[in-house]
Image: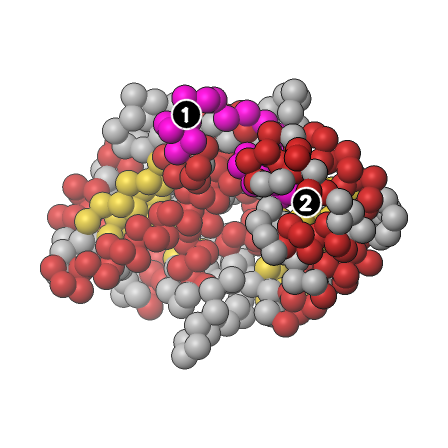
Amino acid sequence: MTWALAGPFCSMILADLGAEVIKVENPEGGDPSRKNFPFLKEVSSYFLSVNRGKKSLTVNLQHPRGKEVIKGLAKLSDILVENFRPGVMDRLGLGYKAIREVNPRIIYASCSGFGQTSPYANRPAYDVIVQGMGGTLSITGEAGGGPVRVGFSIGDIGGGVFTALGILSALHEREKSGEGQMVDVSMLDCQLAFLENAFSRYFATGEVPERIGTRHPVLTPFQAYPTQDGYLVVAAARDPAWTQFCKVIQREDLPSDPRFQDIRVRTQNHKELEKEVNEALKAKTTQEWVALMIQADIPCGPVNSIPQIAEDPHTQAREMIVQVKHSKAGNLKVVNSPIKLSRTPVRLERANPELGENTEEILAGLLGYSREEIAGLKTERAI
């Protein structure tokens, strides 16, 4: 029972891993993200990106008979996932307490902006709001600049990933106890969890983390540098990578320079070092530097565009771009699951469902409704 991004991303992870996922949608238009552009033969590429491999069931959650359908599904299901604002499911009579009465073994997962117990619980939350409130925007961007949103929806996706992890943990525990439980995930909490050493550095020193571009707060060199034709990312803060790096860029004098002799002083003098490195790297292209540095075992890589990483040998070897079949649009490219299992590998076969595509199949096949009963539900606008 999810929409937009955080909830659908969570349930997509489960679908990729083999779960039968039934997406419950409003009969009047369905998930609003079905309307997000760009479109591929009338199919929203946004909707496709987080709803592959699912089935679509249309249900009017305001209708008493629609609620009966949901409770019937809950009785048969292992997991219910929802990402409405806290309180919405309770008002519909479909909150955890109500569903637990139908199925005590169910894992009921709620992913929301601020969680069930926050003083902000009833506020609307979107990715950029969560990134801002969580501190992510305060440390993202160039020094002295304004806040910069992370280029993908880490607020939503973080919530989706942690919700899936909570669900799988609860399922594993159920094997021992036989009991289900509620999983309560806040997107804002996930941002705090992601800000790993920003908090630890603040608690240790009292210094407020700030925007520092691509560089690392305590390791230098550890950032993106301009080359003749693009950018090169280097992570060569520790020896022997540091001394090898200086050899490759033909600046063997740098390790003996008092300003750059160890990590601490290099970080303190990062502006001076950046000038020296920038000047040296102008001599060659990004790929030329990568080839030289990989040969010297220096951690580095290009700053790829989306087309470049899509065609990269790594992406192809790991089968990270695959095709799925859509009933209307034909074969469509999607990003594969990053989880590689040796015995039960992920196989993406189906694209996203059309709105209500599986309604009759689910009602008749899973819940045992007759043709007449299904027709009656349609007439009453319950489905």
**Residue that numbered label 1 is attached to:** 205
**Left or right of 229 in this view: 277:** left
Numbered circles on residues, count? 2
* Most foreground residue, 380 or 202: 202
Q: For residue 201: magenta?
A: yes
Q: Residue at x 68, y 48 (%)?
A: 233
Q: Residue at x 85, y 52 (%)?
A: 285
Residue 52 at x, y percent in the picture: 52, 59
Q: For residue 113: magenta?
A: no
Dot 1 falls on a residue whose secondary structure is helix
| Region of the chain picked out in magenta, as a range | 199-223
Label 2 packing within 10 angstroms: few (<14), some (14-19), many (20+):
some
**Left or right of 39 in this view: 82:** left
The CA span between labels 1 and 2 is 28 Å
Q: Is residue 19 visible?
A: yes
Q: Earlier in the sequence, mark 1 or mark 2?
A: 1
Label 1 packing within 10 angstroms: few (<14), some (14-19), many (20+):
few
Residue 2 at x, y percent in the picture: 41, 45
Question: What is the magenta segment's predominant secondary structure?
Answer: loop
**Residue that numbered label 2 is attached to:** 255
* Most foreground residue, 265 or 11: 265
**Left or right of 301 in this view: 350:** left
